[in-house]
Image: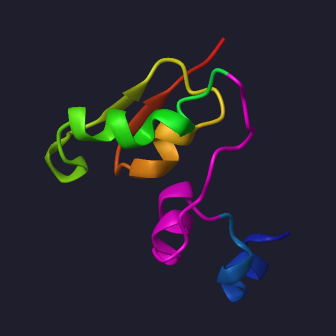
Amino acid sequence: MSTSAAAEAPDLLPLKPQRALRRAPSVQPGPIVKWAGGKGRLLSQLLPMLPPAADMRRHVEPFMGGGAMFFSRLPERALVADI
């Protein structure tokens, strides 16, 4: 696509992931995969142990797995990893 064509069709440009999540605040995404050792079943016990998402500068998820913890919080800034 030429530069002028991209300027004429801004809806075809790739969206930043942060904007995509903010466009649908009523949608609560779930884990990517269900996993026997996942944190999804423990969210009701784990979330009260964490500071409120609004008070966190960055969410660091060293073992993302299916993403249950990450998707339950939808942080503004995050660092996620997995093996």
Q: Position of residue 12 (x, y in %)?
A: 74, 76
Q: Position of residue 81 (x, y in %)?
A: 55, 21
Magenta span of residues: 15-36
**Residue at point 62%, 53% (across, down):** 30
Could you tell me residue 42's position as x and y percent? 46, 33
> How did the renderer colour the structure?
rainbow
Asked if residue 20 lies left or right of residue 57, the reply is right
Please name whichever residue, 1 or 73, is drawn nearer the observer in this view of the structure.
Answer: 73
Q: Residue at x 20, y 39 (%)?
A: 57
At 53% from the left and 64% from the top, the residue drawn is: 28
Which of the 4 image quarters holds residue 37?
Answer: top right
Residue for point 48% across, 58% down: 18
Is residue 25 inside the magenta stretch? yes
Q: Quadrant of the C terminus?
A: top right
Magenta: main secondary structure equals loop
In the displayed structure, 69 sits above or below 75; it is: above
Tally of numbered tags: 0
